[in-house]
Amino acid sequence: METWKRLSTPLLGVLLILGAFFFYSTVSSKAAAEEKIPEQVVLPQYIRPQIKGWAYTEGLTLESSCEVALVPGGDKSSLELYVDAPTDENGQILYDDGQIWTLVLRKHGYFYPLMEKQYIQQGNVSYSAYYSHEDDAFHIMVIKNQRADLDIYECIYDVHEDAFEVRSIYRAKDIEEVFRNY
C-alpha cells in the first residue's frame, strides 16, 4: 500500500497536467476558429519630394518633358524623362541596347523621383500624365518595357501628403515579347 501512495501522487499530478493541457488546447482552438483574424493591412508606398538639386540628372539626356499642374489651375511643374545616352550633331538620341532611365517631376525646387535611376536593357520607358475627375487626382502612368519584363504602375498625387502614391497596375516577368507596335 505504501508503494501505491508513493506512485499515485506523481501519477495523479501528471494526469491533472495532461487534462489541463487537453482542456486548454480544445478551448483555445475553438476560440481561434471563432475569432475573425483581420486581413493584413498594406500601407501605401509614397514618393515624397526631395532636394538634390540638378545633380540627380546630371550627365543624362532629356528624352522628353512636359509642363503639368498637379491640381487644376495650380502652379506648373515639370515632368521629365531622362536617359543615359548621347546625342548626334542633330540632337537625336543615340540609343544602345541598354540605357539608364529616370522619370522625375520638378516642383518649386524639389523633385519627385517617380522612377529611380535604373538600367533598362533592350527597352524603354514611357509615361502618360492626366487628371482624373473620377477620383479628383492627378495621375502619371509609367510603363517600363524591357527585354524580358513589363512593369506598369501609376503615381497618384495626394494633395494632403504632398506626395505620389504608387500603385502597381501590371507586372510580367520572364516574358518573351513577340511584337510591339510602338
Image: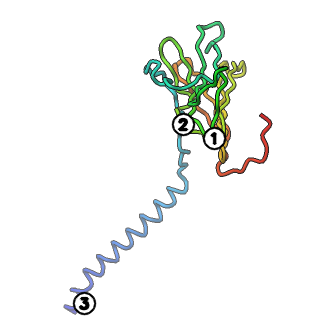
Amino acid tagged 2? Gln
* Of residues 115 and 92, the one drawn nearer to the viewer in this rendering: 92
Looking at the rendered image, the disc whose residue lies closer to the viewer, 2 or 3, is 2
Amino acid tagged 3? Trp
Provide the secondary structure element on which disc 3 rests. helix
**Residue 123: x and y, percent?**
66, 39
Q: How far separated are the C-alphas under marks 2 and 1?
A: 14 Å
Q: Does 155 sit left or right of 6 as displayed?
A: right
Quarter of the picture containing the N terminus is bottom left
Q: Residue at x 65, y 45 (%)?
A: 149
Q: How far separated are the C-alphas under marks 2 and 3?
A: 79 Å
Q: Residue at x 50, y 20 (%)?
A: 111
Whether tag 2 and tag 3 are in contact, CB under 8 A, the answer is no
Q: Which mark is residue 4?
A: 3
Q: Is residue 6 above or below residue 172?
A: below
What residue does disc 1 label?
97
What residue does disc 2 label?
118
Among the two numbered marks 2 and 1 on one chain, the one whose residue lies closer to the N terminus: 1
Q: How far separated are the C-alphas under marks 1 and 3?
A: 88 Å
**Residue 171: x and y, percent?**
65, 43
